[in-house]
Image: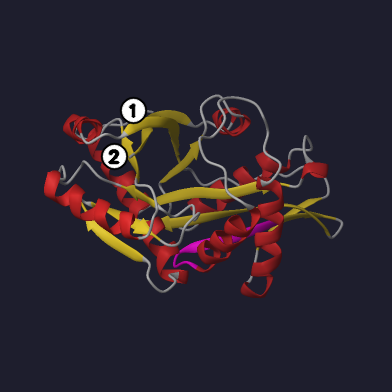
């Protein structure tokens, strides 16, 4: 699957809208979400995974004054500025950031595949359902527990968040507009969970994790296949997922037909 600049711009807009929706679902006092360069700069609270700038470098390349204004807002809140820049964004975007003292701290891979209507085949006894609102706390706890015990394959993430911050962001994201939550069970026992946000024909697959005791049983692959089928059934045309390079998650999605579209450079000032 080939990704040109126009497709990357669509995916980055979807990422921008996803971050904005999560912010709107639980923005605390003193937080901000500001537009910049076609993207968005968000600061929720110290230690939040939402504290970042995403989606920049397609509609416009922010100039020095725009970056200075954003940097002041983060500085007042004593939060470092983290910017995620697509490798298909205008090259001047990353160059201007490095000139301002930003340094590369990590890389994320964005993979995608076209969607086609097909039922998902699950391992024997495994059941996956959309998780209703009254299960939000249960869903968040399952996913947060899975995140707390990551697989060690591939390049480690440059970020680490405490359990309270992960719990908080999952509950906010789980309530965000357009987000669908899923839980996997076998004989009534919870095994894992995942989520998806569908908009503009793009299904963003995110927030998936398997409980440590249930790993190597096909749960992660089943959650992926189920969400792909659900997205196609509800008008999705393209599925995208973000992974760490060389990770087990990247391996799993490539087995399901995903292709590397581009990477995001993670720069911090």
Question: x%, y% of residue 8?
Answer: 30, 38
Helix, strand or loop at disc 2? helix
Can you say whether 158 is above or below 16 in the image? Answer: above
Residue visible at 64% across and 68% down in the picture: 136
Residue visible at 43% across and 70% down in the picture: 27
Query: Does residue 37 appear in this view?
Result: no
Category of crowding for the residue at label 1, using alpha-carbon neighbours closer than 10 angstroms: few (below 14), some (14–19), many (at least 20):
few
**Residue at the disc numbered 1:** 2
Question: x%, y% of residue 90?
Answer: 19, 34
Residue 200, by quadrant, is: bottom left
Can you say whether 245 is above or below 66 in the image? Answer: above
Question: How has the structure been colored for display?
Answer: secondary structure
- Magenta stretch? 176-183
Residue visible at 34% across and 53% down in the picture: 16
Question: x%, y% of residue 240?
Answer: 45, 42
Magenta: main secondary structure equals strand
Residue 92, by quadrant, is: top left
Residue visible at 68% across and 46% down in the picture: 148
> Is the N terminus in the top left, top right, bottom left or bottom right quadrant?
top left
Give yes or no for residue 182 being in the magenta stretch. Answer: yes
Question: x%, y% of residue 53?
Answer: 33, 49
Left or right of 63 on screen, residue 220: right
Q: Which mark is residue 191?
A: none
Helix, strand or loop at disc 1? loop
Query: Does residue 201 appear in this view?
Result: yes
> Is the C terminus in the top left, top right, bottom left or bottom right quadrant?
top left
Residue 17, by quadrant, is: bottom left
**Residue at the disc numbered 2:** 7
């Amino acid at each position: 699957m080939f990704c040109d600049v126009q497709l990357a711009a669509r995916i980055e807009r979807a990422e921008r809208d996803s971050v904005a929706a999560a912010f709107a679902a639980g923005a605390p006092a003193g937080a901000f979400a500001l537009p910049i360069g076609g993207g968005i700069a968000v600061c929720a609270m110290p230690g939040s995974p939402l504290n970042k700038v995403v989606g920049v470098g397609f509609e416009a390349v922010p100039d020095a004054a725009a970056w200075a204004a954003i940097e002041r807002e983060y500085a007042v809140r004593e939060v470092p500025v983290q910017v995620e820049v697509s490798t298909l964004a205008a090259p001047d975007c990353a160059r201007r950031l490095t000139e301002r003292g930003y340094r590369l701290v990590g890389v994320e891979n964005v993979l995608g595949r076209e969607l086609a209507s097909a039922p998902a085949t699950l391992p024997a006894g495994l059941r996956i359902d959309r998780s209703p609102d009254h299960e939000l706390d249960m869903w968040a706890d399952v996913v947060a527990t899975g995140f707390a015990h990551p697989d060690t394959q591939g390049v480690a993430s440059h970020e680490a968040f405490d359990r309270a911050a992960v719990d908080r962001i999952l509950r906010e994201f789980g309530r965000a507009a357009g987000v669908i939550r899923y839980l996997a069970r076998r004989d009534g026992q919870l095994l894992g969970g995942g989520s998806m946000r569908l908009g503009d024909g793009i299904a963003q697959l995110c927030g998936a994790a398997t409980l440590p005791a249930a790993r190597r049983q096909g749960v992660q692959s089943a959650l992926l296949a189920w969400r792909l089928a659900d997205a196609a059934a509800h008008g999705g045309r393209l599925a995208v997922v973000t992974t760490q390079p060389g990770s087990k998650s990247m391996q799993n999605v490539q087995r399901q037909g995903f292709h590397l579209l581009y990477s995001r450079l993670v720069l911090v000032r």
